[in-house]
Image (cartoon, grey):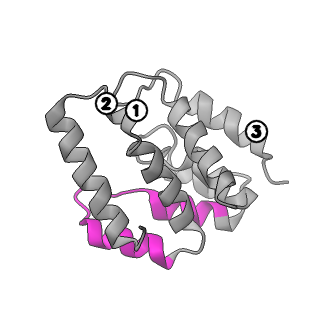
Amino acid sequence: MTLTLPEVEALARAAHEGQTDKAGRPYAGHLKAVADGVRARGGDDHQIAAAWLHDAIEDEALTEGWLREAALSDRTKAIVLALTKQPGEPPEEYAGRILATPGARLVKEADLAHNANPDRLSVLDEATRTRLTEKYARMRALLGLK
């Protein structure tokens, strides 16, 4: 039996409990925004589940071992793994893995859209805002997003 979307959401919220984004807001807000963005872009349930979990391994909220054993579709697992940036990994390699994984690009598009939201960035200091804006623009270009 595969976890339902409400179960995945609850699991992701619990896994990221106490974590905040760069602006100090609860991290679950970012996860919800990405999941909503995937849904708005026509993503399917596998992609929405992956959106809720897209940072779980990278942020060490959950382990790769947990993901392997989780009651999730192979497609969801593959997308989560594709979106898990490895330490020191070149952006080109990361983008290539996303592009090679069916369904991952849409989830990353929603992630980048929320990360680059001017309202979110406006609360950061100018140097951080500039660095992140350039980082997100570069990843969008590598993924062929406008």
Disc with the residue nearer the chain's start (3 vs 1): 3
- Residue 107, placed above or below residue 102: above
Q: Amino acid at mark 1?
A: Asp
Task: Tell me the residue at 60%/69% (across/down).
Answer: 103
Who is closer to the viewer here, 101 or 81?
101
Contact (CB < 8 A) between labels 1 and 2? yes
Q: Please identify the quarter of the rendering in which residue 10 is found.
A: top right
**Rendered-image quadrant of the C terminus:** bottom left
Residue type marked 2: Ser
Residue 130 occupies which quadrant of the picture? top left
Q: Quadrant of the N terminus?
A: bottom right
The amino acid pointed to by label 3 is Glu
Q: Position of residue 72 (x, y in %)?
A: 71, 56
The alpha-carbon separation of the residues under discs 3 and 1 comes to 29 Å
Q: Which residues are magenta?
A: 76-100
Which numbered disc covers residue 146? none
Considering only order in the chain, which callout, 3 or 2, is on the residue closer to the N terminus? 3
Q: Nearer the viewer, residue 114 or 93?
A: 114
Residue 26 rendering spot, x and y as whole percentages: 48, 23
Residue count near mark 2 (Cα–Cα under 10 Å), binned few <14, some 14–19, many ≥20: few
Give the residue furthest to the right. Answer: 1
Number of marks drawn:
3
Q: Find the distance from the CA under tag 1 to the CA under tag 2.
A: 5 Å
Q: Is residue 77 magenta?
A: yes
The residue to which callout 1 is attached is: 119
* Residue matched to label 2: 122
- State the image coordinates of residue 39 (x, y, percent, origin top left): 69, 53
Viewed as shown, does residue 3 lie left or right of 21?
Answer: right
Disc sitting over residue 7 in the figure: 3
How far across and how far down the image is residue 126, in percent?
Answer: 17, 33
